[in-house]
């Protein structure tokens, strides 16, 4: 069970079995940084998030082909926060080299790539180390022991403090943990899966035994199902939304899913009864799971961030009766 600390309006939870405390709600940079948010706006957004108690900021090498890290790094430099006051993560697998031969530069977790990829991220983020590093996807072509040893060495070198996985099957996470245990190496501490009302099976079923057996923590992404759970896609894709971005064309079919949009419409009265919005209800629902260490939010405007942070007020209102009503609407459509 995740330990919750409530010294401020923002609550904090242990990252799995580690001693690191992360804010229940955190701020991510996928899609928004560089594409929708420049370094000046990012600094303003980060400052607002930090003032609200958020201490965990998520990134990845591949976000905007490294530009996401550059924007966040420039914002950190401008803000000049004490390094102990914030937690930064990044993720590796896809690679960002688009020119020339892709061998050892893309879609891999081999030792050569990981060592050089983290150096690149540190340069872009303008940091001496990152707190959390993730294997962004499993790599079936690299021996698992090579991945675990490389992650262990990056921590031993002081370039990262903890490592984990993102969207790995439960069996692979367990195998990595047991290999690290057997060889006295740093074990994976956390997993970063998608988790929302329509995407639940992995967190609630597949990983079920890993929480107690391994002390696995979760930093979950897409609590709003890429915006579907805000209700704004019930009448199509509005201009200026994430779904309208050219690079997000692959997402539009999911956002225009008629049965799911109908379910979202049924959730609206529940959100209203609780005194919140659909977005706040969806975020609070994800954070209500005690196995979740932090729910990663996305925001392109400070007003959007402030609104999403209002989900904290809904958490104590999610009674068993309310949760049962939500499940009756969404569970039949969940995967």
Image (cartoon, rainbow, N blue to C red):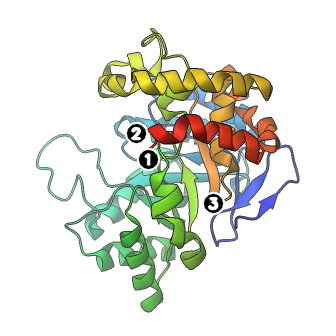
Mark 3 nearby-residue class (10 Å; few <14, some 14–19, many ≥20): many
* Total numbered badges shown on the rendered structure: 3
Instruction: Report the residue marked by disc 3.
Output: 291
Quarter in which the N terminus is drawn: bottom right
State yes or no: discs 1 and 2 in contact (Cβ < 8 Å): yes
Instruction: Report the residue marked by disc 2.
Output: 63
Q: Which mark is nearer the camera, 3 or 2?
A: 3
- The answer to whether residue 280 shows anywhere in this view is yes
Cα distance between the residues tagged 3 and 2: 26 Å
Q: Position of residue 279 (x, y in %)?
A: 63, 28
The residue shown at (77%, 42%) is 315
The residue shown at (55%, 78%) is 213
Question: Between 278 and 63, which is closer to the camera in this rendering?
Answer: 278
The answer to which of marks 3 and 2 sits earlier in the sequence is 2
Q: Position of residue 264 (x, y in %)?
A: 55, 25
Asked if residue 305 is positioned above or below residue 245 in the image, the reply reads below
Q: Secondary structure at mark 3?
A: loop
The answer to which of marks 1 and 3 sits earlier in the sequence is 1
Q: Position of residue 35 (x, y in %)?
A: 43, 25
The residue shown at (63%, 35%) is 282
Disc number placed over residue 60 in the picture, else none: 1
The residue shown at (29%, 27%) is 250
Cα distance between the residues tagged 1 and 3: 23 Å
């Amino acid at each position: 069970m995740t330990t919750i600390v409530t010294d401020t309006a923002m609550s904090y939870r242990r990252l799995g079995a580690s001693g690191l405390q992360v804010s229940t709600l955190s701020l991510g940079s996928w899609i928004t940084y560089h594409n929708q948010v420049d370094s000046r706006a990012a600094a303003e957004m980060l400052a607002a998030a930090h003032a609200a108690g958020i201490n965990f900021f998520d990134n990845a090498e591949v976000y905007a082909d490294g530009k996401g890290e550059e924007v966040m790094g420039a914002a950190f430099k401008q803000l000049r926060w004490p390094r102990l006051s914030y937690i930064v993560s990044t993720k590796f697998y896809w690679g960002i080299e688009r020119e020339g031969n892709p061998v050892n530069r893309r879609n891999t977790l081999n030792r050569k790539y990981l060592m050089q990829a983290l150096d690149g991220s540190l340069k872009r983020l303008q940091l001496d180390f990152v707190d959390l590093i993730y294997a962004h996807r499993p790599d079936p072509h690299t021996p698992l022991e090579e991945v675990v040893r490389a992650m262990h060495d990056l921590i031993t070198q002081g370039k990262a403090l903890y490592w984990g996985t993102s969207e790995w099957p439960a069996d692979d996470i367990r195998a990595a943990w047991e290999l690290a245990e057997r060889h006295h190496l740093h074990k994976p501490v956390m997993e970063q899966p998608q988790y929302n009302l329509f995407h639940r099976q992995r967190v609630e079923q597949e990983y079920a035994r890993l929480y107690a057996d391994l002390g696995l923590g979760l930093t979950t992404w897409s609590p709003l199902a890429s915006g579907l759970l805000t209700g704004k896609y019930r009448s199509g894709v509005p201009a200026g939304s994430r779904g309208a971005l050219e690079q997000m064309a692959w997402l539009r079919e999911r956002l225009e899913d008629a049965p799911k949009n109908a379910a979202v419409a049924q959730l609206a009265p529940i959100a209203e009864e609780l005194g919140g919005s659909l977005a706040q209800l969806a975020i609070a629902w994800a954070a209500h799971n005690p196995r979740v260490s932090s729910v990663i939010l996305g925001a392109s405007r400070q007003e959007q961030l402030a609104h999403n942070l209002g989900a904290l007020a809904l958490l104590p209102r999610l009674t068993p009766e309310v949760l049962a009503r939500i499940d009756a609407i969404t569970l039949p459509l969940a995967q």
